Amino acid sequence: MAEAFDTIVIGAGIAGLTTARLLTDAGHRTVVVEARDRIGGRVWTDRSDGRVTDRGASWIHGIADSPVAAAASAFGMRMVEFTVGGYQPDSRPMAHYSPEGARLSPAAAAAYVADIHAVDAALIEAIAASGPLATYSDVTETALGAQGWPPERTQRVREYLEHRSEEQYGAAITDLAAHGLDDDQIDGDEVVFPDGYDALARGIAPGLDIRLSHIVSHVRWGADGVAVTSDRGVFTARQAVVTVPVGVLQSDGSRSSPRCRTRSRRRWLDCA
């Protein structure tokens, strides 16, 4: 016999747990079904060797006005600054070098960082004016050209932006869409969690009805609500929230009736 709820949340990652937390606190009968034998999704802390190793998500990119940092503080998670990513050119600790391999003086490093910030500011307008097929390389060249710098100075910043694309997304700057970095607003220090990032998931989860090791194979939805079929039974509800990765939704093992289409760039389901 199917278990009935107000809402079924598929996936016990941070998105799924947060959704269930908000719904449960609002009085909804909510169940979370998760294929893995743990919560957290890509937040996965491995303690198998007696050490704390985050094998998935491992740090916060900027804690200023960050809801994740606010939650971590509320849960008492210990944070240590680790501002070393290439997204912030004036992050700490970071040293800048010349093309010849000599470390820049403080004044030269400050001038180089100022150049990067100038191009970042110009990129905002360049991206806004770009067409749908423009690459990040296209808008970068537009922003660089607006500076009127000599070739060597321009090339230094161009190389930095190329590295940023590769570091953040593992893609060449010519393969990244012009709007590919729109979601990366980085402000404030970057921090890591010496006691494990999984404390975030554990802080959200208490009191939630979470069913681990439940592999969902089919979601049927219609005017009468939804039915979610797993390898451990069927769940029914008025509504369902699917929080699994787009790659899972696009796989052969994911089925919905009527069929939903995934819009991978915007990360949502079109079930109209």
Image (cartoon, rainbow, N blue to C red):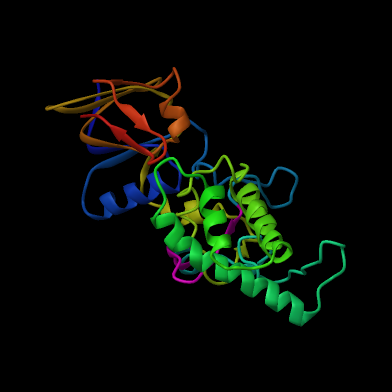
Nearer to the camera, 4 or 34: 34
In this view, 77 is above or below 208: below
Quarter holding the C terminus is top left
Magenta-colored stretch includes residue 69: yes
**Is residue 76 shown to the viewer in this render?**
no
Magenta-colored stretch includes residue 205: no
Residue displayed at 73% across by 71% down? 93
Q: Is residue 205 left or right of residue 4?
A: right
Find the magenta span and give its range: 58-70
Residue 79 placed where, x, y %? 60, 67
Residue 255 placed where, x, y %? 35, 20
Residue 8 placed where, x, y %? 29, 36
Q: Is residue 161 left or right of residue 235?
A: right
Q: Is residue 33 left or right of residue 170?
A: left
Which corner quadrant of the image does residue 160 belong to?
bottom right
Residue displayed at 61% across by 50% down? 165
Residue displayed at 22% across by 47% down? 28
In this view, 51 is above or below 91: above
Which corner quadrant of the image does residue 148 belong to?
bottom right
Nearer to the camera, 262 or 49: 262
Residue displayed at 58% across by 70% down? 117
Nearer to the camera, 133 or 262: 133
